[in-house]
Image (spheres, rainbow, N blue to C red):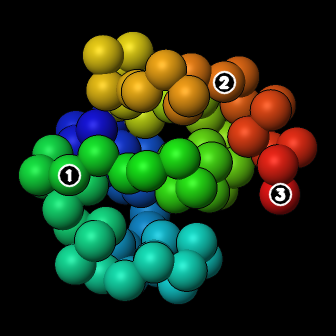
Amino acid sequence: MNEKLRLARIERNLSELDVCSAIGCDLKTYENWELGKHIPQGFWRGKLCEFFGKSLIDLGVNSHHLHTADRKPLVEWLRIW
């Protein structure tokens, strides 16, 4: 995820803490996503897509990052909530 996620945040003039507050995750977790140390799990992927108004691909999650169960269209993820 990393660079594209970071750029999406910067485009909105937000700090990492602003994003964390908006989606409800802790700062260290978000930092790890931007640094590419970890890939967000399904729930967080949906939150990030909804918050930024971008697809997983736009945020830097490639299909090889997704488990078979996670390869649902964004509409399905939002329907789960």
Quick one: SS at disc 1?
loop
Residue 40 shows in the view? yes
Q: CA distance from mark 3 to mark 2?
A: 14 Å
Identify the residue position indicated by label 1 in the image.
Answer: 38
Q: In the image, is residue 39 above or below residue 27?
A: above
Which circle's residue, 2 or 1, is located before the other in the chain?
A: 1
Tally of numbered tags: 3
* Residue at 55% over, 80% down: 24
* Residue at 37% over, 83% down: 26
Q: Amino acid at mark 3?
A: Trp
Residue 11 shows in the view? no
Identify the residue position indicated by label 3 in the image.
Answer: 81
Whole-percent x, y for residue 15 in the image? 36, 74
Within-10-Å neighbours for mark 1: few <14, some 14–19, many 20+: some
Q: In the image shown, does 30 or 52 lie closer to the viewer?
A: 30
Q: Amino acid at mark 2?
A: Lys
- Residue at the limit of the structure toward the front, as seen here: 69
* Residue at 52% over, 57% down: 44
Within-10-Å neighbours for mark 3: few <14, some 14–19, many 20+: few
